[in-house]
Image: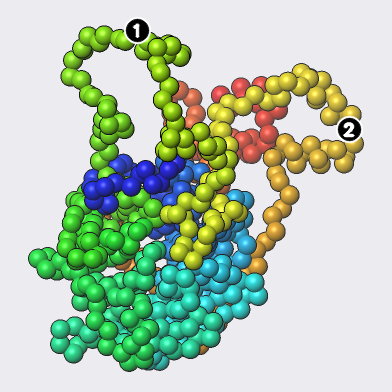
Amino acid sequence: MNLELLESFGQNYPEEADGTLDCISMALTCTFNRWGTLLAVGCNDGRIVIWDFLTRGIAKIISAHIHPVCSLCWSRDGHKLVSASTDNIVSQWDVLSGDCDQRFRFPSPILKVQYHPRDQNKVLVCPMKSAPVMLTLSDSKHVVLPVDDDSDLNVVASFDRRGEYIYTGNAKGKILVLKTDSQDLVASFRVTTGTSNTTAIKSIEFARKGSCFLINTADRIIRVYDGREILTCGRDGEPEPMQKLQDLVNRTPWKKCCFSGDGEYIVAGSARQHALYIWEKSIGNLVKILHGTRGELLLDVAWHPVRPIIASISSGVVSIWAQNQVENWSAFAPDFKELDENVEYEERESEFDIEDEDKSEPEQTGADAAEDEEVDVTSVDPIAAFCSSDEELEDSKALLYLPIAPEVEDPEENPYGPPPDAVQTSLIDEGASSEKKRQSSADGSQPPKKKPKTTNIELQGVPNDEVHPLLGVKGDGKSKKKQAGRPKGSKGKEKDSPFKPKLYKGDRGLPLEGSAKGKVQAELSQPLTAGGAISELL
């Protein structure tokens, strides 16, 4: 796919709904990989559903957690996923195999997990009512980041675009910029309202391109800053935001904000309804409002890394927003002409000749002579949209797509082998050791997977009885009806367990009582080997 040809000359933001992705379970959070080819969705039954975004089909389902998944992040090369669930557990997953590499147990609920943009050995974790924690996966160690005020531990944090600095913000509006390697304070400033009052920081988000970042605050204003200016101002600086974005009419609070892939637009999801507001960053004007279904509450928003597509989650379903594609065939060739009706065409005598005998060949000079030069069609140039400004080549080991095995509805047992009778006679003659092998192959059981290492993270002074906001929030009516846990159609113990009907006697349909009921239950508990036992029950 040539991304350069996909660039539209007009607006570069979505305009209308473009379908939904139903994960069977209720979706809670979603995130794109670095190329936008895969979309990971965390569900309320603990599963992570990975969608192939080009085919809009499910590529893989990872049974990750028991409790709902509240945060997800892809590694830079796309081979790993880190997830957090509402039972305070952070796990790293191998995307290809679906296996858990490591697990960390925290004392309080996790609000956010994020990979280091350039070093997938480091993960930033934001526990509730605690200072942010940076995990080192190789040795399972952790570092608690310094905070401005020990009494105010409602802190959010984020890596900058390249992971050189960590930005943290607390409930008093104080932003700290820490050096990632040493955790030294490099710069700081306070976000204030029109008066000198402070406002709580709800989230910090960075653009994929450029040095801009946004801060979503409790005063319902989204402030856009330039990271270079923050570092220049230093400690206790007073930088001015480039833009202040808000809904002046409805005073809408914002649930989730993020930049577009090129960093030129900002989308914010309303905390009151399923509505997406899109602003142009350079001017600060509101360019579009996308309205979802009435009465639904928004949970998460993600903008595609390289295309004008937005994924939003409400009522457990992922909605896709995209541009309206209008086919304009005349744009492909300048001499192409669209016809409303058939026109008679007179062909030239030499039009379909392989070589025009009458044509005189002019001498090749200048640009015409250059056409005879050999064109290189074998070397592959890197796609600029997938490379950072400090990189020349793409990552050759990156995981862009997942292989999908075809689903066979009724697979034939042993279609090309010997008849079943011959197989049974040969199996009877085998010894005990071969019986064990046969049983394991019949059950389809694989060798036991290696149990992931679980590390308990102990944080000083953090309350253990906190409830995750996802569990305590009042949702809409639809989300209340659906309970957390495996859906009915999933494979579980309940589905495999035998159905237990009520026991009835004769044609009247009277329930069995006393000794007769006990006798039938005793007979049911024994294996039925002959037809006589079945006839006795009837």
**Picture coordinates of residue 476 (x, y %)?**
26, 56
Asked which secondary structure carries label 1, the reply is: loop
Foreground pick, 185 / 510:
185
**What's the residue type where badge 2 is placed?**
Glu
Crowd tier of the residue under label 1, counting other residues whose Cα lies within 10 Å: few below 14, some 14–19, many 20 or above:
few
Residue drawn where x is 23% and y is 45% of the image: 16
Residue drawn where x is 35% and y is 44% of the image: 6
Image quadrant occupied by the C terminus: top right
**Picture coordinates of residue 263 (x, y %)?**
33, 62
Q: Which mark is residue 430?
A: 2
445 left or right, relative to 210: right
**Picture coordinates of residue 245 (x, y %)?**
20, 69
- Residue 168 shows up from this direction: yes
- Residue 49 shows up from this direction: no
Tag 1 residue: 349
Q: Give the mark toward the camera: 1 or 2.
A: 1
Earlier in the chain: of badge 1 and badge 2, it is 1
Foreground pick, 212 / 529:
212
Tally of marks: 2
Foreground pick, 171 / 431:
171
**Picture coordinates of residue 214 (x, y %)?**
30, 71
Residue drawn where x is 71% and y is 46% of the image: 446
Residue drawn where x is 80% and y is 24% of the image: 423
310 left or right, relative to 337: right
Foreground pick, 304 / 496:
304
